[in-house]
Amino acid sequence: MTDIEELRQKIVQFTEDRDWDQFHNPKDLAIALSVEANELLECFLWKNPADVKIEKVEEELADVFNYAILMASKYNLDIKQIVLKKLACNAEKYPVDKARGNAKKYNEL
């Protein structure tokens, strides 16, 4: 079993134990993911990166991962496969020779 699959199983079990799956439809998971991502942003609001409370970043990032993994589970998506697919797509859009050290979007390279 991979680490990702182990996490997925633990997150799903946590949810099932509390009968929360009834609330975790894809729409609400997407909203929850957005809310948690914004709570992660709040960790940085009005602060220098060095002044951020890493424990709070850790907590909010875990929430983001939890909801993303639940979303993938709802659609039976293979997390490793979809991440590698996206990396391959981005490699085509951002070839190293054009994108290295450059923050421009792919259509501006």
Image: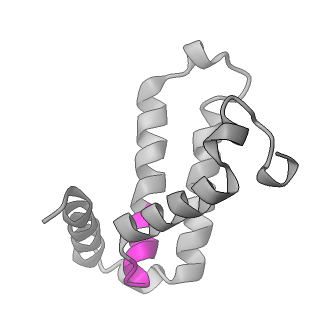
- State the image quarter where residue 2 is shown: bottom left
> Which region of the structure is painted magenta?
67-77
- Residue 96 point in image, percent of width and height: 62, 41
The residue at the point 53 percent across, 72 percent down is 29
32, above or below 12, in the image:
above
Residue drawn at point x = 28 percent, y = 73 percent: 12
- Image position of 7 (left or right of 78): left
Question: What colour scheme was applied to this rendering of the protein?
Answer: one colour
- The residue lying at 65 percent from left, 37 percent from top is 42
**Going by the image, does 49 lie left or right of 14?**
right
Q: Nearer the viewer, residue 107 or 29?
A: 107
Q: Where is residue 26 shown, x and y percent of the image?
A: 53, 81
Residue drawn at x 62%, y 68% as measured from the top left: 31
x and y, in percent, of residue 77 in the image: 40, 78
Query: In which quadrant of the rendered image does the N terminus lie?
Result: bottom left
Tell me residue 72's x, y (percent). 42, 74
- The image quarter in which residue 3 lies: bottom left
* Above or below, 101 relative to 28: above
Give the tally of numbered discs.
0
> Residue lying farthest right?
108
In the picture, which quadrant includes the C terminus?
A: top right
Q: Residue lying furthest front in this view?
A: 97
Q: Does the magenta stretch include residue 75?
A: yes
Q: Is the magenta stretch mostly helix, strand or loop?
A: helix
In this view, the residue in front, 69 or 16, is 69
Residue nearer the viewer, 83 or 91: 91
- Residue 51 vertical placement versus 31 (above, below): above
Residue 41 is covered by the magenta coloring:
no
